[in-house]
Each structure stands twice: as C-alpha cells, then as structure tokens.
Amino acid sequence: MISDELEHDYIVKTVYRIGKGNPGSTAVLMRILNDFGMMDFECLCYDFEKKKILGSEVWRQYKDECGEDLFKFVKKIWSGAEGYIDQRIQEIKQE
C-alpha cells in the first residue's frame, strides 16, 4: 500500500502537471479527485494529457463549454469503458 505522504506527493505533482498552476484548473482537478476518487482521477488525468487539455484549458472547458457542471465535464473528458462513468455519476449523486 502506498504511504499517505507518497500519495500526497503524487497528487500534488499530478494536479500541477495537468493544471499548470492555474487556480481554476487546480480547483476542478481537486473536485474530481474528491468526488470521483483516486482511480477515476488517474484515468481522467491520462485523458487530459492524451487530449492535450492542460493548464487554463481545463478551467475554460469546465466553465465555458460545460457551464461549471462537473458531471458534464467529466463525461466530456472520459474515454474509458462506456457506461462506467454514467454509473459512477449516479453513485456519486446518491451519496
């Protein structure tokens, strides 16, 4: 099992790598982590990089294209198994 300190360092580095220090992007990434958990967060970070959605572009797409709707934004970015993210969103909404 990964230590809390190593996990924290990994999260900080990942959020900085994707968000490029942009405060809005950092806030969105932390919301994804908090709402969806580490496994989904890691998958989405891979998708951000693959699609070259980095830095202020994370915030811009979340705010302007998705109307600050986190679930809509995650569905837009997600390229994993079909149906999975819809199921996760329903689980999160029920919590």
Image (spheres, helix red, strand yellow):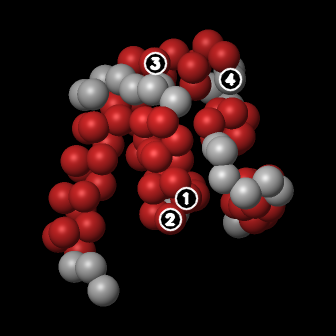
Q: Position of residue 50 (x, y in %)?
A: 48, 36
Left or right of residue 9: residue 54: right
Q: Which residue is mark 1?
A: 40
Check disc 4 and report the residue beneath it: 66
Vertically, is 80 above or below 71?
A: below
Q: CA distance from mark 2 to mark 4?
A: 23 Å
Marks 2 and 3 in Cβ contact (< 8 Å):
no
Which residue is rendered at x = 62% and y = 26% of the image?
Answer: 68
Spatial separation of the CA atoms under disc 3 and disc 1: 20 Å
Distance between the alpha carbons at the discs numbered 1 and 4: 19 Å
Q: Amino acid at mark 2?
A: Met
The amino acid type of the residue labelled 1 equals Asp
- Mark 2 → mark 1, Cα distance in angstroms: 4 Å
Visible residue check, residue 90:
no
Earlier along the polypeptide chain: callout 2 or callout 4? 2
Which residue bears the numbered disc 3?
Answer: 57
| Residue 92 shows in the view | yes
Badge 3 local density, few (<14 within 10 Å), some, or many (20+)?
A: some
- Residue on which disc 2 sits: 39
Nearer to us of marks 1 and 4 is 1
> For the residue labelled by badge 3, is the local secondary structure a helix, a strand or a loop?
helix
